[in-house]
Amino acid sequence: MALQASAEAVGNSKRPFLKSAGGLLVAVGLFHLVFSLIGLWALFLGGGSDLTERAGIAGVLDSFPPGLWLKLGYGYFLLQILLGWLFGLSTMAAGRACAQARRRGFVLWMTVLNWFFFPAGTTVGLVVWTGLRRPSVADSFDS
């Protein structure tokens, strides 16, 4: 009985790291969502100098001849916004799973994918990845 209680105490001593790492991942996920919202703002609202011009990137893309380039431009920006939302929500889900000590593989993959989002994603990803690779922390995850 005492051995089981001491094993639980050792497992729970690593939970504060997992909770703080999960909080960092949720914060980075929120950054992805906010920057996607900024992309939406830039696409549709930002940058117009007067009421007769179309605002934002839409106004810039309208200066090109109609056709393929316009469609590719809109498609690219909308894809970036969609991927930002998907990646942000996935990173937040990984942060929640990390805080609850579940789905270690998913959390590791999301931290590695965050390395591509410099500087915040890279920094948080490396810190969380380094901590999750420690055997004592890895053992505290539920199987």
Image (cartoon, helix red, strand yellow):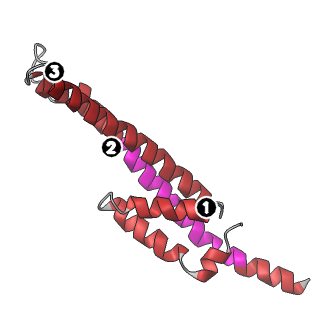
Question: Which residue extends farthest front?
Answer: 68
Q: Secondary structure at mark 2?
A: helix
Residue 22: x and y, percent?
54, 61
Q: Is residue 34 above or below residue 21?
A: above
From the image, tell me which residue sits under label 2.
35
From the image, tell me which residue sits under label 1.
99
From the image, tell me which residue sits under label 3.
67
Question: What amino acid does circle 2 point to?
Answer: Phe
Q: Residues within 10 Å of mark 3 (few under 14, many from 20)?
A: few
* In the foreground, 61 or 127: 61
| Quadrant of the drawing holding the N terminus | bottom right
Q: Is residue 51 above or below residue 4?
A: above
Q: From where the camera sits, is residue 65 visible?
A: yes
Label 2–label 1 contact, CB within 8 A: no
Position of residue 91 in the picture relative to residue 34 (left or right)? right
Gap in Å between the C-alphas at discs 3 and 2?
28 Å
Identify the magenta region: 11-34
Residue 26: x and y, percent?
49, 54
Question: Which residue extends farthest right?
Answer: 1
Indicate yes or no whether the magenta region holds residue 27. yes
Q: Secondary structure at mark 1?
A: helix
Residue 3: x and y, percent?
85, 86
Q: From where the camera sits, is residue 24 visible?
A: no
Label 3–label 2 contact, CB within 8 A: no
